[in-house]
C-alpha cells in the first residue's frame, strides 16, 4: 500500500464557512493548519466500521455459499420434499454431491468460437477461488485506466486518508493503485501466491470463503495502516495526511497464510538470485517492515502498518483454523437466518 504525500492543502477560512464574503485561501508548500495543530485521527468509528464490515462480508459470503449448496442439492434430487431440515443435512448432502460430481463429471465438449464460450473454456480448469483471483487481478488493472479519466474522483473514493476519508475507503482503497507499476506488482504477487492458498485445505477452492477472507483482510490491513499513523514514529505527525491505497495489505495476508501453510517451503525474490527458507524470509520481512514503520526508509513511502497487519491476519487465520472457527460458524448462522425467513 503505497502512500502519496500531500504537497498542498488549502483550508477554507471562516468567511467561506459562514458565507459572509469571498473566500481567502493561502497556499503553501507542505501541510498547514492554524496554530500548527494537526487534525486528530479518528479511532473508534473506523475500528467499529471495520469490524462490522468484515462481519457483514463473512455472513454475506456464507449466505451465498449456503444458498448455492441448497440449490445444487435440490437440483440433484437429494432432498425429496424440497426442503432442508437442518444444517447437518445440508452438509451431508453437500458431501454426497461432491462425490457424485466427481464420479459422473462430463468432459467439456468443443464449441464454435464465440467470446463468452472461449472465456468459459479458459476458466474451466480453475476452481471458484482461482476464478475470483483472476477477477480481482483484472479489477486492479482496470481501475488504473479508470483513474486516469478522473484522478480527483478516484483519489476521493479509492484512497484512504486517515484524517479525512470516510470509513468505506478502508475497503475501496484495496482496489486503488497509484499507477500501472504499482498495480502490476501487487497483481503479480496475487497471481503467484493466491492460487496455492486457494487450493489449500483451508479454502479448498471455495470462492465464497476466499472472497470473505480476501476482502476482510484488505479492510483490516487498511485499518492497520490507519491506526499506525498515531504511533510515536519519526514521521507519525504527517503520516496521517498521506493517502493510502493498494492491495498489498491483502496480498500480505495471503503471504502470511501461505507461509503458515508451508513453513518448510523455499521461495525466490524477483531480481534477487537464490532462494530462501520461509522462516528466514518472513523474519527479514517483518524486521524490514518494523524498521520502516518506526524509523523510516529514505525514498520509500510504504504502508508498513498495512503490511504488518496483513501478515498477522493471514498467519493467524491459518494457525487458529479460521475455516473451523469462523467460516463454518458463519455458514451455520447464515443457514439459521435463511431458514427463519424461509429462504431455504
Image (spheres, rainbow, N blue to C red):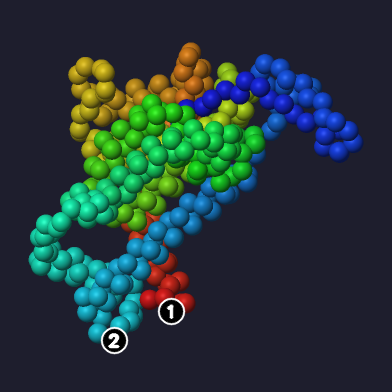
Answer left or right for 184 relative to 176.
Answer: left
The residue located at (62%, 28%) in the rendering is 241
- 43 or 113: which is nearer to us? 113
Label 2 with label 1: CB-CB less than 8 Å:
no
- 92 or 70: which is nearer to us? 70
- 297 or 68: which is nearer to us? 68
Answer left or right for 182 relative to 276.
Answer: right
Query: Please, is residue 149 above or below residue 76 in the view?
Result: above
Q: Residues within 10 Å of mark 2 (few under 14, many from 20)?
A: few
Answer left or right for 101 relative to 283.
Answer: left
The residue located at (73%, 20%) in the rendering is 27
Which image quadrant for residue 98?
bottom left
Q: What quarter of the picture does the C terminus occupy?
A: bottom left
Q: Earlier in the sequence, mark 2 or mark 1?
A: 2
- The residue at which mark 1 appears reads as 342
Find residue 68 and report its horizontal and vertical position in percent: 32, 67
Q: Is residue 227 visible?
A: no
- 277 or 110: which is nearer to us? 110
Which image quadrant for residue 142?
top left
The residue located at (47%, 25%) in the rendering is 302
- The residue at which mark 2 appears reads as 81
Q: Is residue 154 visible?
A: yes
Find residue 181 and report its horizontal and vertical position in percent: 38, 26
Query: Please, is residue 149 above or below residue 100 in the view?
Result: above
The residue located at (25%, 85%) in the rendering is 80
SS for tag 2?
loop
Find residue 230 and report its horizontal and vertical position in percent: 60, 30
Amino acid at each position: 500500500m503505497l502512500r502519496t504525500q500531500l504537497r498542498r492543502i488549502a483550508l477554507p477560512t471562516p468567511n467561506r464557512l459562514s458565507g459572509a464574503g469571498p473566500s481567502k485561501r493561502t497556499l503553501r508548500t507542505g501541510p498547514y493548519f492554524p496554530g500548527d495543530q494537526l487534525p486528530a485521527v479518528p479511532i473508534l468509528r473506523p475500528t467499529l466500521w471495520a469490524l462490522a464490515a468484515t462481519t457483514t462480508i463473512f455472513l454475506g459470503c456464507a449466505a451465498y455459499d449456503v444458498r448455492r449448496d441448497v440449490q445444487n442439492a435440490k437440483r440433484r434430487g437429494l432432498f425429496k420434499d424440497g426442503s432442508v431440515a437442518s444444517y447437518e443435512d445440508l452438509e451431508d448432502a453437500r458431501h454426497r454431491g461432491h462425490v457424485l460430481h466427481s464420479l459422473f463429471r462430463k468432459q467439456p465438449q468443443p464449441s464454435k468460437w464465440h467470446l463468452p464460450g472461449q472465456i468459459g473454456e479458459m476458466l474451466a480448469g480453475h476452481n471458484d477461488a482461482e476464478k475470483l483471483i483472476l477477477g480481482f487481478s483484472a479489477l486492479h488493472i482496470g481501475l488504473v485506466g479508470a483513474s486516469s479519466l478522473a484522478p480527483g474522483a478516484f483519489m476521493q473514493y479509492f484512497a484512504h486518508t486517515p484524517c479525512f476519508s470516510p470509513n468505506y475507503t478502508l475497503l475501496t482503497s484495496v482496489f486503488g493503485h497509484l499507477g500501472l507499476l504499482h498495480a502490476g506488482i501487487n497483481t503479480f504477487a496475487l497471481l503467484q501466491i493466491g492460487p496455492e492458498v486457494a487450493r489449500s485445505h483451508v479454502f479448498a477452492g471455495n470462492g465464497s470463503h476466499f472472497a470473505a477472507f480476501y476482502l476482510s483482510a484488505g479492510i483490516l490491513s487498511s485499518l492497520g495502516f490507519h491506526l499506525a499513523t498515531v504511533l510515536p514514529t519519526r514521521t507519525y505527525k504527517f503520516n496521517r495526511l498521506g493517502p493510502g491505497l493498494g492491495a498489498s495489505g491483502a496480498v500480505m495476508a495471503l503471504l502470511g497464510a501461505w507461509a503458515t501453510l508451508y513453513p518448510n517451503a523455499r521461495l525466490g525474490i524477483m531480481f534477487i538470485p537464490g532462494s530462501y527458507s520461509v522462516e528466514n524470509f518472513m523474519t527479514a520481512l517483518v524486521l524490514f517492515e518494523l524498521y520502516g514503520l518506526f524509523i523510516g526508509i529514505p525514498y520509500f513511502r510504504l504502508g508498513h502498518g498495512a503490511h504488518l497487519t496483513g501478515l498477522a491476519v493471514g498467519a493467524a487465520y491459518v494457525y487458529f483454523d479460521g475455516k473451523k472457527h469462523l467460516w463454518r460458524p458463519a455458514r451455520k448462522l447464515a443457514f439459521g437466518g435463511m431458514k427463519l425467513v424461509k429462504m431455504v
